[in-house]
Amino acid sequence: MAGNSLIRFETSHGDFTVELYAEEAPETVANFLAYVDAEFFDGTIFHRIVPGFVIQGGGLDVDFANRQTRDPVRNEAKNGLKNLRGTLSMARTSAIDSATSQFFVNLADNAFLDHSARDFGYAVFGRVSDGMAVIDAIAGVPTGRRKGYQDAPLEDVVIKSARRLGA
């Protein structure tokens, strides 16, 4: 998967790098890079933490207010990539093509999130290439009900910045 973009996330709990799969998920990656280039993720939080499952972020600020997003993108879950530990996928509503800016990192192999006859699935578009220990540390933050959200971290887990490496 040479030539894929690398994104460095600086968070309040440490840094991690992700590799994006532009060949397998071109529309999703283009959408994600548009958010990165606009510095959209700066100041957003990981608002959902479910140990052994996922950490989710990319759409809410520290007050749990939704950021204004771009239009949704087509769901590319049929790209053959699997929701394995360390992969990034687009979050969405029950509508198949509803993903905008929110993404999640799989903390385990979550085959039930893959495209199948049962469910269209969630589009994998990258993987954590460095810093999985930071992802695991974030997954260990105590959670509870906060500002109307379940599985919310009881302390802010802030994305300070997300930037392309080598750009």
Image (tube, rainbow, N blue to C red):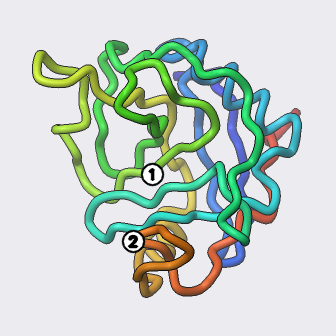
Q: Which residue is drawn at 50% across and 70% down?
A: 148
Cα–Cα gap, marks 2 and 1:
15 Å
- Which amino acid type corresponds to the residue marked 2 in the rendered image? Asp
| Dot 1: element | strand
Q: Badge 2: how crowded within 10 Å, few (<14), some, or many (20+)?
A: some
Which quadrant of the view contains residue 156? bottom right
Q: Name the residue under label 2.
A: 151
Q: Residue at x 66, y 74 (%)?
A: 14
Which quadrant of the view contains residue 62? bottom right
Count the labels in the image: 2
* Whole-percent x, y for residue 154 in the image: 52, 86
| Dot 2: element | strand
* Whole-percent x, y for residue 149 in the image: 47, 68
Q: Which residue is drawn at 88% across and 37% down?
A: 38
* Whole-percent x, y for residue 130 in the image: 56, 56
**Vertical side of 16 occupied by 153: above or below:** below
Q: Is residue 45 rendered to the left or right of residue 42?
A: left
Q: Which of marks 2 and 1 is nearer the N terminus?
A: 1
Q: Name the residue under label 1.
A: 105
